[in-house]
Image (spheres, coloured by chain):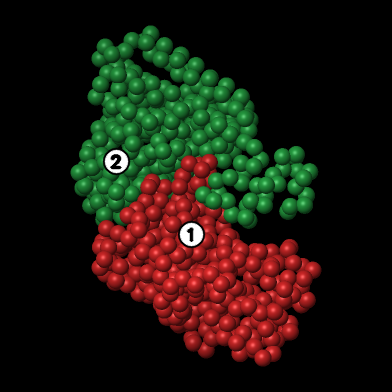
Amino acid sequence: MTALADTELETETEELTVREAIRQAMREELRRDEDVFLIGEDIGVFGGVLEVTGDLYEEFGPERIKDTPISEAGFMGAATGAAATGTRPVVELMFSDFAGVAMEQIMNQMAKMRYMFGGKAEMPVTVRTTEGGGMGAASQHSGTIHSWIAHFPGLHAVAPGTPAAAKGLTKAAIRSDDPVFVFENKMIYEQKGQVPTDEDFTIPLGEAAVEREGEDVTVVATQRLVGESLQTAEGMADDVDVEVIDPRSLYPLDTETIVESVRKTGRLIVADESPLSYGTHAEIIARVQEEAFFSLDAPIQRVGTPDTHMPFSPPLEQEVLPTGEDVRNAIGRVT
Amino acid sequence: MADYDLQSEAGRRDALRRMVTIRAFDEEAGDRFADGEIPGFVHLYIGEEAVGVGTCAALEPDDYIASTHRGHGHCIAKGLDPKYMMAELYGKADGYCNGKGGSMHIADVDEGMLGANGIVGAGPPMATGAALSIDYQDRDQVAVGFLGDGAVAQGQVHEAVNIAATWDLPAIFVIENNHYGEGTPVEKQHNVDTLSDTAQAYDIPGVTVDGMDVTAVEEAVAKARERARAGDGPSIVEAETYRYRGHYEGDEEPYRDDAEIERWKARDPIETFKDRLIDRGELTEDEFDDLQAEVEAEIDAAVEFALEADDPTPEQAYEDMFAEMPPEIDRFATAARTDGGESGGDRR
């Protein structure tokens, strides 16, 4: 467990947005390790469709910021082959929905090579991709697919909810010798927060952060819902003392920090934008009941996207997107 | 690591020996599979030996190859040891992949063998990726992606070749046209008559050579390698060949007749190359018999090794998922069913 208030913020920090934090992470790792290069669609001169790679091209040029054809299977496969042969590619998959095009490379090659070959292949590849609804991008550009990846053996999945987590996890992903997917919720790119300036600041995979301490109910929230849950918690502070945990890493998952919290509060809400059925919520809840069933004082609640695709029309999108208000209602049901 | 070429007498003899070794290995693997000793599926390379050996003869020892589901021949051509290959087919701890891969996933990345592959068309993206590493680090190597005729219809193959061509990567795509994609003839899978014509779409060289002739394959791949190393990008080499056995062992082959198989056998790559070496005075029938006997002894020893090798331990099922074992898996790794499952009751 890492409590932000206790450790990470003792170091020198600066205020960055999530977008800036991710870009800074990549800049530092590109400077640190010549084997690292970026590969994806329109990440060079264009700066990335959501402007995350931004000006990196100016510093590192076309050799290290590689614009690809629109060939998700091709460049995901090339990154896999490159990772197995001595380099450390960082892939930008423009929207996570496009994983469908590249899934063969992800599930049958990237995820399996090390294991199938009895450990004879290295796979130091990072895949950054955007998730989430909220900007009217409709069903094929708004998906939240991290449960697929976290479910699939051989892949790590992280999903930052704050600028500090975004930087620390991106750097940890690039330094990892295993495939790591970094799921960036597109609605929080402008969210600001304090980020450590130390170039060796990383957040180890599998460490959750207690973003707010509380005694009455535990909210495990991811991505956009971390900030919204913190706001909700502040708004309810007179009535209920809410603990908010950002797991940050979905696989591996810091079960211990979540379980410790539930042992204390006896109540759990899991808030994650992925579709409700068969996913991230279910996994977290299953682990809590394995370890802390007898500490529970109320039924566990889930906040997520009902099992629909993301509709285009703003009123429809707002209907299905999970929000801090849903977290408030869930807390209300169990306290 | 294999270091041989067809320019010297010793190299030609080495190439012949490798082709004989591939055939002996696969005949033995087929027999042992039929006996029920080898689990899973096996796809045999018998008949296609000149393609793998001709290709690897044109390569330098540290070049990469990415193989297919029919990969035994590529492994031997590249220089992998039949002993550890056979142990892998038997699922033993001493196999190339510690028994975790089997016939379809034999690999030795350090030796430049990026794996046999159970997914049709997955080799070319891997080769493009290896070529990308080579190019990025400015290394003096090339990467070969083998693919079958059936894989030419795969979307990921197009993407991989297009990227390699667009970026002038040092890759070579070797199409082994054995005339059947599983059980469907090549002409029913593609609109082009000549598969190497697809190279025109990428503005790269595409040639079709006699895949039953190890020399023809070697010459074409050597030329492609030279182009790749000059920084001019990839080539497509189509080798027309034939598999004598079914798609997999047990295939009843309703899609072809014996007469067709016999026509191809008349052009057998080992026989024709052997005859050529004899005609050139580089080999005698007796020497060839000795060579075959040596190879057979080597394969017998490989089977012996595989039979005597240890099974993997139950704990090995949990190893090599990641560089660092996550707690999710560690909880099983530390309580493997070493006692046949009795202790496992409280962990799942």
The x, y position of residue A5, in whole percent, is: 55, 75
Instruction: Please state the horizontal and vertical placement of residue B340, each as a whole percent of the image.
Output: 75, 40
Disc 1 residue type (three-letter): Val
* Mark nearer the viewer, 1 or 2: 1
Q: Residue at x 75, y 47 (%)?
A: B344
Rendered view: B177 above or below B16: below
Indicate the secondary structure of the residue bearing disc 1.
strand
Q: Could you say whether the residue bearing mark 2 is in a helix, strand or loop?
A: loop
Query: Depth check: B178 or B344 in front?
Result: B344
Q: Nearer the viewer, residue A96 or A241?
A: A241
**Is residue A145 visible in this depiction of the protein?**
no
Numbered mark located on residue A97 in the image: none
Q: Which residue is mark 1?
A: A180
The three-letter code of the residue at mark 2 reads: Gln
Q: Chain of mark 1?
A: A
* Residue positioned 33% across, 36% down in the render: B62
Give the residue pinned by disc 2. B141
Q: Position of residue B274 (x, y in %)?
A: 34, 18
Residue A243 percent coordinates (x, y): 64, 78
The N terminus of chain B, quarter of image? top left
Few, some or many C-alpha atoms within 10 Å of disc 1 (few <14, some 14-19, many ≥20)? many
Residue furthest top in the image: B286
Which chain can be seen in green?
B
Q: CA distance from mark 1 to mark 2?
A: 28 Å
Quadrant of the image occupied by residue A50: bottom left
Callout 2: 10 Å neighbours few (<14), some, many (20+)? many
Which residue is drawn at the image coordinates 62% and 36% (left, top)?
B312
From this view, report whether residue B244 is shown above or below residue A239.
above
Give the red chain's letter. A
Q: Determine contact: label 1, label 2, CB under 8 Å.
A: no
**Do we see residue A45 in this rendering?**
yes
